[in-house]
Image (spheres, rainbow, N blue to C red):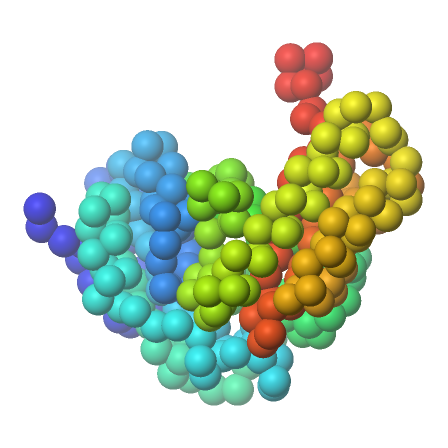
Amino acid sequence: MSGPELSKTIPETRERLQAVRNAGKSIGFVPTMGALHYGHARLIEAARSENDFVAVSIFVNPLQFGPNEDYSRYPRALAADIDLCRSRGADLVFTPSVDDMYPEKQLTFAEVGKVGDNLCGAFRPGHFRGVVTVVLKLLNIVQPDRAYFGEKDIQQLALIRRMARDLALPVRIAGVPTVREPDGLALSSRNRYLSPAERTAATVLYRALLRSRDLAQAGEAGASVIKKEALRVLESEPLGKVQYFDLVDENMQPVDRVTPGIRAAVAVWFGSTRLIDNMELVRIDKDSQ
Ligand code: PAF
């Protein structure tokens, strides 16, 4: 099978995608930071199934890392990433350098509102500003019909959806369900940092989320009751240090009561690795809407 076209610069990418649009083809776009895993494969497959042409970007975005975060050690695996893109039928892989994306000091940013205040936003100042700025820039370069993001990063997805609505971006933002290991751990590029003992312990996020969902589905509607029980599960794991556990609505605002669509969201440190996960507690019945 021949591989995807590779494109390194913004002008080259724009020119290629303009030709795709001129040919009347729809474009699906999967922005990534590389170190691709099966979760990304599912994003590419979703894009493949709904569009004529699929573009993937691989760019570790310095704007979204804080000064003491893992930008320099973030895993880079370009050859394996291109193989995965090929195996899922991507047509183009865009791999800009930092100098291509930020040729001069960036002065213009997309500001995030309250959707970015809680959960990860409360602990990673500037992170979501960096995320939405690079996503807006990538969307401007690629100009896709549809762009695909994982539900594992639920706050990021909520912010990007909100940005697309607030700024009337001509793109449909699609959320793709979280992919899990057989024992429930959500796939993440950062899982590879975990020691064997931490990897075993890391299933506690999933266990706490499942316990919360079970309680909610058994009729418990009080957020404080569910939080207390989830924290009990999380704190039973000595290798983990809980950063947050909360129940939030679609704008990532904390709630007191569980209603359909509410999600539990959690972040836990294992040594120097921070893992996040989330789960919808009671499904929105789409048929009754
Ligand atoms: O989810 C990610 O990998 C990144 O935050 C994204 C959306 C590619 C922006 O850099």
- Of 161 and 124, nearer the camera is 124
Give the residue displayed 47% in from the left and 86% down from the top.
Answer: 104
Q: Quadrant of residue 241?
A: bottom right
Q: Is residue 144 above or below residue 109?
A: above
Q: Quadrant of residue 46?
A: top left
- Percent x, y for residue 52? 27, 37
Q: How many marks?
A: 0
- Percent x, y for residue 227? 83, 47
Give the residue displayed 82% in from the left and 44% down from the top.
Answer: 229
- Of 115 and 210, nearer the camera is 210
Q: Is residue 48 above or below residue 205?
A: above
- Of 22 and 250, nearer the camera is 250
Give left or right: position of 208 versus 63. right
- Percent x, y for residue 192? 42, 65
**Res 247 visible:** yes
Q: Which residue of the protein is positioned furthest toward the left in this rendering? A: 1
Q: Quadrant of residue 120?
A: bottom right
- Percent x, y for residue 237? 68, 59
Question: Where, quadrant-wise, is the C terminus in this rendering?
Answer: top right
Give left or right: position of 168 versus 138. right
**Res 138 visible:** no
Q: Is residue 116 above or below residue 229?
A: below
Give the residue displayed 58% in from the left and 79% down from the top.
Answer: 69
- Of 288 and 225, nearer the camera is 225
Give the residue displayed 61% in from the left and 46% down from the top.
Answer: 206
